Each structure stands twice: as C-alpha cells, then as structure tokens.
C-alpha cells in the first residue's frame, strides 16, 4: 500500500470535518424551520414572565428569530422595568395603553397610546408608568450577536 503524504492526510481530515459540519448545520436548520404554527404567537398571560414592576411577554426572542426581538411589557402605575440605561442596540417602544414617561439623554416627555419612541444606539434611555392604570407597550430590538 502506498504511503499517504501528510498533505493528503490533512486534506482528507479537512474534508471529513467539513462534511460533519455540513451535517450538523443541516440538522440545526431543520430544527429551526419556521412554520405557520410557530410564526403565529397569540398573547397568553399564563406564559408571561412576572417582573418586579408587572410582567413581560416575548412574542419573538433571540432564540426564535435571527436578529430581531419583540416583547410586550406591562408596568404597574408608578413603576418602571429598570433604571435608565444604555446598550449598543437601537430600540423602539410602541405604547399600546396607558401613559408613559420616556427618558432620553437627560430629557423626559410624557406620552400616551399609539405613540412610538426611538432609542438610538448607546443613548441613555428609560420608560416608566406615569399614569394610574397599567402601562402596556411593545419593545422592538435588533440583537447584535
């Protein structure tokens, strides 16, 4: 039997590894196929996560989508989900119900339902409930993996 050169062996190993990687990738893609059943997500309070200020419900999280997330937050009167903060991702809020106090880079404004709020990347921002009823809003964010 002819002796194989080191170069030939390295090429064979690389081809074998590539085949294994392709099989794993194909299997992962099959398990994350989008269907009509998993692309429709109706709000279900029993699947919501309780927070210190109310609760949140993920319509689409970073495990499901490739880069975007969609969450609904419900905040009790006088509370906020967290203190003003910043992160590299841009973010949108869309007020569904209630009255929000929106903080952006040192300024604050109060807004009501059917209002969108934009947070540029790395801006200091926060949102809190400025009303006497629950504040309900959507959070739309691109995940920077």
Image: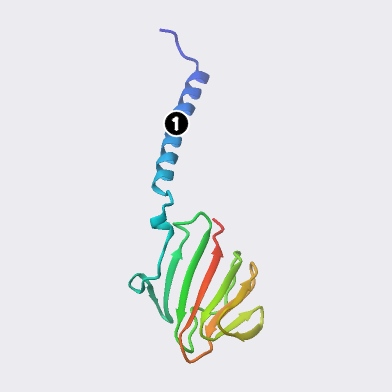
* Residue furthest bottom as drawn: 132
Which residue is located at x 38 percent, y 72 percent?
A: 49
Sort mark 1 into few (<14), some (14-19) or many (20+) by Cα contacts within 10 Å. few
Tell me residue 85's x, y (percent).
57, 74
Tell me residue 91's x, y (percent).
59, 68
* Residue furthest front as drawn: 36
> What colour scheme does the image use?
rainbow
Secondary element type, mark 1? helix
Q: Is 43 above or below relative to 134?
A: above
Tell me residue 106's x, y (percent).
66, 82
Viewer-proximal residue among 15 and 142:
142
How many numbered tags mark residues here? 1
Classify the position of the C terminus by image quarter: bottom right
Viewer-proximal residue among 72 and 54:
72
* Residue furthest top as drawn: 1
Viewer-proximal residue among 105 and 45:
45
Q: Is 140 above or below relative to 128?
A: above
Which residue is located at x 44 percent, y 65 percent?
A: 59
Which residue is located at x 46 percent, y 62 percent?
A: 61
Tell me residue 107's x, y (percent).
66, 83
Q: Give the quarter of the image for residue 94.
A: bottom right
Residue beneath disc 1 = 19
Q: Give the quarter of the image for residue 1.
A: top left
């Amino acid at each position: 039997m002819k002796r194989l050169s080191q170069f030939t062996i390295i090429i064979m190993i690389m081809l074998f590894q590539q085949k294994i990687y392709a099989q794993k990738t194909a299997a992962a893609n099959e398990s994350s196929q989008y269907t009509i059943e998993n692309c429709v997500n109706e709000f279900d309070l029993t699947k919501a996560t309780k927070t210190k200020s109310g609760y949140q419900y993920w319509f689409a999280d970073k495990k499901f989508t490739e880069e975007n997330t969609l969450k609904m937050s419900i905040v009790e009167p006088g509370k906020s989900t967290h203190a003003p903060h910043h992160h590299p991702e841009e973010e949108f809020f869309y007020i569904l119900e209630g009255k929000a106090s929106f903080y952006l880079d040192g300024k604050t404004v109060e807004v009501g339902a059917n209002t969108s709020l934009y947070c540029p990347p790395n801006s200091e921002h926060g949102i809190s409930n400025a009303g006497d009823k629950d504040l309900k809003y959507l959070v739309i964010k691109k995940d920077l993996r």
